[in-house]
């Protein structure tokens, strides 16, 4: 017995050591970004070395970001798009994935392949632009939500999770008199918290980081999402009308990169509790 | 006709089901499964509108597209655009680089998040687990523009961090970024570094769905830590692994951002990918038809790859992924 | 019934959301002018501008990037006051600009006035009658002092000018750290051999006197995109190096387009290669240069590691400011032009950044649009973009210039003045480093005939140039870093010539000749 404990003890230690090493390796570039964002520009642009500990600290880079017109409004827009997009996307995806589980129903297999193909074929920018224009969604925030509300990847992923749930789960519920809808809402979904949290996270991150559609379809300054506004800072003067380079500064660029990560850092811990083990406990019995 | 049929004995009568009866049967079938159909209906509408309707534009790959004449009035040129693509000298090189790099990425990069997820799962201290998890996700959120330049600095033969460390153990400075022998490994390794943390999420979700009773049963049967992983955890997440693998094939020919940021003329012969090569051509050509042609070519190959793998998967786990 | 309605509830909600969202939103694009078409009829001779028109200028950029922060506002006011134009700037992010323009054209939403650089689309638009001629503006007397033939004719076809030329590249001298020259007791180099020695001295003799061996002569981009003036010390006005644009250049004597990739020119190319590879061997070219991108090169210079920088004069004031933040006594001096074996100077660059505005048939009044553009690029208009408005952003008393607005001062780009086509525009504020650089670059000559834009109208060029440039770039890089000897150029040249370089040059030249008449 003690031999086993010893073994698991040193294995534990090894694992922890390895994980800490990996974490440090992952942290270095992030620390680099953070450090650069806190340095004054003439130090930040020094090439050929890693900046981990700032020689001099200034908040000027972040001040530049806050000063930027529309930054608060764009933050609100991004939050709106992310929340609406990820919640509705996850709901629709869950519904569709569960529906696609029933491979025996006629047409389901065909539709599954249909969905798969959308992952691989795309018409490009021009037809999408025309579609959005014809739907009247030009310069409308919903143009950033609707066209990307679902992703085939997530649908297929979620479907495989639903398939892996034991049939006894729904069978025992049906014996108890639940109809299909009840089974779905009351039994399957609550059990599937891990995958739902995962898909929600995937959608949220995708919406939050999206840039191209915000830049393409929104012309009204007050409707632009945060990524677009932030990237404007990176190209202070790139108008073909002017000459010379008014570069915003390396420290501001790094501050922008850091700022876009922070919201994710805040959201993730809330979702994390859904990734804990053992939710399936006891549900089959009885 | 009817008289002839009426004259036949019962068993020999052909089973002609009149249209109305068929329609009724279909309606009954739909009604029986209406919950299923209703569930998929909104999503189906979404995919049809936003993903399928734009596909009409793909015909531009077969046309000499003039933006002002419009798509329908532009001349049909058949496979000429594709011939233009294949006749460029470096297309084969770009294609083979893409395949090689993808293969290396899959071989080394696909298992990495799985192993990391398994390791993370073994950590008993919840606070540490949470911390490590959050940290390993972070590189995924930094763009290659930022991460690439950091790596170039770290790997520099003139005082970069990696070479300094190597120097401490007596290995001479290696010019990783300009060496044709090393550069592909640089790309693969940095790609793993950036994406393996994020990749663990799906596996952790999968692991969390494993019933603890299975583990208890294994312990009773005398399984140690390794045994539990090998006999319980891994088999339970194999379906997830397979799905993720097959789905990842959809992006297998897309290699742009990382290579574009990190490559240079001395290593381009081993790292130029389809996308970076097309980008260079595109600077000159600025051609919608050309871009669509390349996209279509990649998509067709990807589809073939996925379908093949899908069938192969049937042999392993008895059913296809799709 | 209850269960059915519950099942349907959520999909129904989603559907309603979708329907609600499909309500048409305010669309800039749909603002197709339904105003009176642009004819100021005789009955309104008293006030031709009685009817307001709405004109949108679509260009790349971000708000505030047009010049000083209030530039857009000033333009709108002037446009309204003078011509009753409701002016609007549509500023599109550069990353999506090409896609936007392409999509807009495909959808039939032609911008009123727009900036664009892709020749193929413009040519198709001209052929399709979508782009209106701007001859009236380009032949305006205000440009009589300008060599129209040299500067405006790129989009001159069938007797009409189609592009409103407004911007060409500025002087791009080779800039050196003046204080380092002083520290080492060196004078400004005036030919490639002297420049070579200077760069080596920058590398080996500790010019910043900090006791560390951490400096080198010059940093350049890995793709040789910015080293043009170094190459043209030996070669005629190629775009940036023999490894770009199939080495095409405009030979002024014969007024034809030729290529440098011939056996006859090989000796000169090899001289250049020897120069570069020699410097690299001495460490005078940044050993990391092959991995450097544009901003890295700048970083090396402004952080005090590199002693030379090949850069357009407009980039000098901010660079000097950054340098002086850490080294207060830093100075930037421009090297004078060098005459190459072809009789031109290394600063005689083809102005490859010629920019144009195009006007489409969607504009409600082309004359007023042109009037505005002419004002916009007149000294008055240029000053609003570079300095702002007198009394608001700056004040000018007795020739003394003083900034009143700090934001404007930070975002002002004085070099813009020299990139416009009216050479008589004076700097209001004296910018010593720019003026010194311009003076040193005396003999600087600007061409507005942009070889690459003629080249893209040649099918041979389109199908082969990317490959040729790639082979050249790889080979030249290998020579410079010493992996191959200079004589490797002979086999490199043979390989590339097998592609039909001469045919490409001939075809591009044919396009050029046809377009010039």
Image (cartoon, coloured by chain):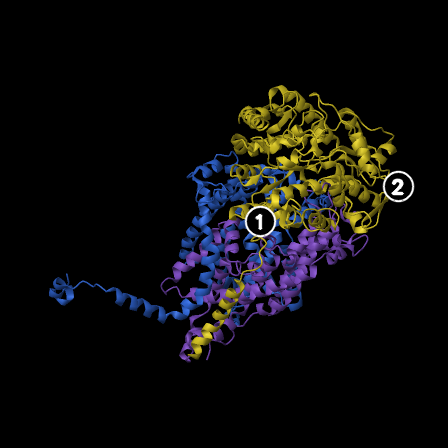
Secondary element at image label 1: loop
Chain C drawing hue: yellow
* C151 is higher (above) or lower (below) than A96: above
The C terminus of chain B - image quarter? bottom left
**Discs 1 and 2 share one subunit:** yes
Q: Position of residue C267 (x, y in %)?
A: 66, 20
Q: Position of residue C301 (x, y in %)?
A: 77, 39
Q: Classify residue C404 as left or right of residue C108.
A: right
Cα distance, mark 1 to mark 2? 47 Å
Q: Quadrant of residue C264?
A: top right
Q: Quadrant of the N terminus of chain B?
A: bottom left
Chain shown in purple: A
Nearer to me, C450 or B146 = C450
Chain to which the residue tagged by mark 2 belongs? C
Up the image or down, A260 lies above or below C320; here it is: below
Q: Nearer the viewer, residue C477 or C177?
A: C177
Dot 2: what SS? loop
Crowd band around label 2 with a 10 angstrom C-alpha radius: few (<14), some (14–19), many (20+): few
The residue identified by callout 2 is C398
Chain letter, colour blue in render: B
Residue at numbered disc 1: C36
């Amino acid at each position: 017995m003690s031999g086993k404990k010893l073994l698991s003890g040193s294995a534990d230690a090894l694992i922890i050591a390895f994980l800490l090493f990996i974490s440090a390796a992952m942290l270095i570039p992030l620390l680099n970004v953070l450090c650069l964002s806190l340095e004054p520009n003439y130090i930040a642009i020094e090439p050929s070395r890693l900046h981990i500990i700032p020689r001099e600290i200034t908040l000027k880079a972040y001040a530049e970001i806050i000063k930027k017109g529309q930054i608060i409004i764009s933050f609100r827009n991004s939050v709106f798009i992310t929340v609406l997009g990820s919640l509705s996307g996850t709901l629709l995806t869950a519904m569709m994935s569960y529906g696609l589980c029933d491979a025996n129903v006629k047409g389901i297999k065909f539709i599954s392949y249909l969905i798969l193909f959308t992952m691989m074929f795309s018409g490009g920018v021009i037809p999408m632009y025309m579609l959005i224009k014809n739907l009247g969604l030009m310069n409308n925030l919903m143009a950033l939500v609707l066209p990307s509300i679902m992703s085939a990847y997530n649908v297929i992923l979620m479907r495989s999770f639903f398939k892996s749930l034991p049939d006894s789960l729904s069978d025992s519920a049906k014996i108890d008199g639940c109809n299909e809808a009840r089974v779905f809402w009351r039994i399957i979904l609550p059990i599937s918290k891990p995958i739902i949290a995962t898909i929600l996270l995937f959608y949220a991150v995708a919406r939050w980081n999206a840039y191209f559609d915000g830049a393409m379809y929104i012309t009204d300054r007050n409707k632009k999402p945060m990524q677009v506004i932030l990237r404007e800072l990176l190209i202070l003067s790139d108008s073909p009308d002017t000459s010379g380079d008014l570069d915003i500064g390396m420290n501001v660029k790094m501050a922008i990169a850091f700022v876009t990560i922070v919201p994710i850092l805040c959201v993730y811990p809330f979702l994390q509790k859904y990734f804990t083990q053992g939710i399936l406990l006891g549900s089959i019995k009885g | 006709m009817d008289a002839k049929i009426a004259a036949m004995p019962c068993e020999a009568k052909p089973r002609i089901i009149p249209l109305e009866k068929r329609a009724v049967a279909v309606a009954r079938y739909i009604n029986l499964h209406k919950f299923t159909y209703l569930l998929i209906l909104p999503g189906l509408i979404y995919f049809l509108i936003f993903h399928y309707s734009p596909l009409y534009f793909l015909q531009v790959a077969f046309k000499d597209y003039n933006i002002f004449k419009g798509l329908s009035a532009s001349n049909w040129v058949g496979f000429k655009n594709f011939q233009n693509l294949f006749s460029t000298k470096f297309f084969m090189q770009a294609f083979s680089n893409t395949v090689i790099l993808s293969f290396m990425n899959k071989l080394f990069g696909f298992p990495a998040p799985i192993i990391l997820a398994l390791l993370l799962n073994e950590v008993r201290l919840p606070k540490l687990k949470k911390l490590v998890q959050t940290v390993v996700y972070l590189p995924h959120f930094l763009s290659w523009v930022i991460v690439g330049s950091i790596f170039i600095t770290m790997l520099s033969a003139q005082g970069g961090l990696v070479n300094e460390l190597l120097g401490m153990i007596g290995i001479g400075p290696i010019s990783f970024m300009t060496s044709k022998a090393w550069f592909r490994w640089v790309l693969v390794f940095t790609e793993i570094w950036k994406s393996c943390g994020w990749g663990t999420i799906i596996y952790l979700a999968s692991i969390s769905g494993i019933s603890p009773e299975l583990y208890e049963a294994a312990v009773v049967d005398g399984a140690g830590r390794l045994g539990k992983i090998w006999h319980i955890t891994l088999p339970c997440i194999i379906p997830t692994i397979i799905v993720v693998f097959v789905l990842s094939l959809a992006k297998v020919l897309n290699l742009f951002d990382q290579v574009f940021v990190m490559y240079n003329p001395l290593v381009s012969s081993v790292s130029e990918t389809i996308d970076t090569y097309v980008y260079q051509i595109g600077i000159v050509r600025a051609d919608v038809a050309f871009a669509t042609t390349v996209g279509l070519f990649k998509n067709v190959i990807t589809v073939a790859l996925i379908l093949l793998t899908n069938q192969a998967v049937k042999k392993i786990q008895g059913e296809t992924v799709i | 019934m209850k269960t059915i309605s519950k099942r349907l509830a959520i999909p129904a909600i989603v559907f309603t959301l979708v329907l609600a969202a499909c309500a048409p939103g305010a669309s800039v694009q749909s603002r197709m002018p339904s105003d009176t078409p642009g004819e100021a009829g005789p009955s309104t001779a008293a006030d031709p501008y009685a009817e307001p028109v709405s004109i949108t200028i679509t260009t790349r950029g971000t708000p505030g990037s047009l010049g000083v922060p209030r530039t857009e506002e000033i333009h709108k006011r002037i446009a309204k006051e003078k011509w009753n134009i409701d002016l609007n700037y549509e500023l599109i992010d550069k990353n999506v600009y090409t896609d936007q323009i392409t999509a807009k054209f495909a959808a039939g939403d032609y911008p009123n006035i727009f900036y664009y650089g892709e020749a193929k689309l413009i040519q198709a638009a001209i052929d399709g009658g979508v782009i209106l001629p701007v001859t009236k503006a380009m032949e305006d007397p205000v440009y009589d002092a300008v060599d129209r033939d040299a500067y405006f004719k790129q989009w001159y076809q069938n007797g009409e000018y189609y592009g409103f030329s407004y911007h060409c590249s500025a002087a791009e001298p080779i800039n050196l750290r003046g204080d380092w020259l002083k520290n080492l007791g060196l004078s400004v180099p005036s030919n490639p051999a002297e420049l070579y020695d200077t760069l080596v001295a920058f590398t080996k003799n500790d010019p910043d006197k900090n006791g560390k061996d951490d400096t080198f002569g010059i940093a350049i981009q890995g793709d040789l995109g910015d080293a043009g003036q170094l190459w043209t010390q030996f070669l005629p006005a190629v775009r940036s190096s023999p490894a770009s644009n199939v080495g095409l250049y405009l030979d002024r004597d014969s007024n034809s387009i030729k290529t440098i990739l011939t056996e006859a020119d090989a000796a000169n190319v090899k001289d250049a290669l020897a120069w570069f590879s020699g410097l690299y061997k001495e460490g005078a070219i940044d050993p990391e240069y092959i991995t450097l991108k544009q901003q890295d090169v700048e970083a090396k210079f402004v952080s005090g590691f590199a002693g030379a920088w090949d850069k357009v004069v407009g980039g000098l004031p901010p660079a000097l400011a950054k340098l002086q933040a850490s080294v207060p006594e830093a100075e930037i001096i421009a090297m004078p032009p060098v005459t190459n074996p072809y009789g031109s100077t290394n600063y005689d660059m083809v102005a490859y950044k010629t920019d144009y505005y195009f006007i489409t048939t969607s504009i409600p009044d082309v004359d007023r649009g042109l009037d505005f553009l002419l004002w916009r690029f007149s000294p008055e208009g240029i000053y609003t973009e570079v300095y702002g408005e007198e009394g608001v952003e700056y004040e000018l008393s007795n020739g003394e210039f003083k900034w009143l607005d700090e934001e404007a001062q930070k975002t002002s780009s004085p070099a813009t003045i020299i990139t416009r086509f009216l050479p008589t525009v004076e700097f209001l504020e004296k910018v010593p480093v720019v003026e010194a650089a311009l003076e040193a670059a005396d003999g600087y000559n600007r061409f507005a005939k942009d070889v690459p834009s003629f080249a893209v109208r040649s099918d041979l060029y389109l199908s082969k140039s990317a490959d040729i440039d790639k082979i050249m770039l790889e080979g030249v890089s290998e020579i410079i870093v010493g992996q191959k000897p200079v004589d490797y150029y002979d086999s490199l040249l043979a390989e590339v010539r097998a592609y039909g370089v001469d045919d490409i040059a001939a075809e591009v030249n044919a396009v050029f000749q046809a377009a010039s008449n």
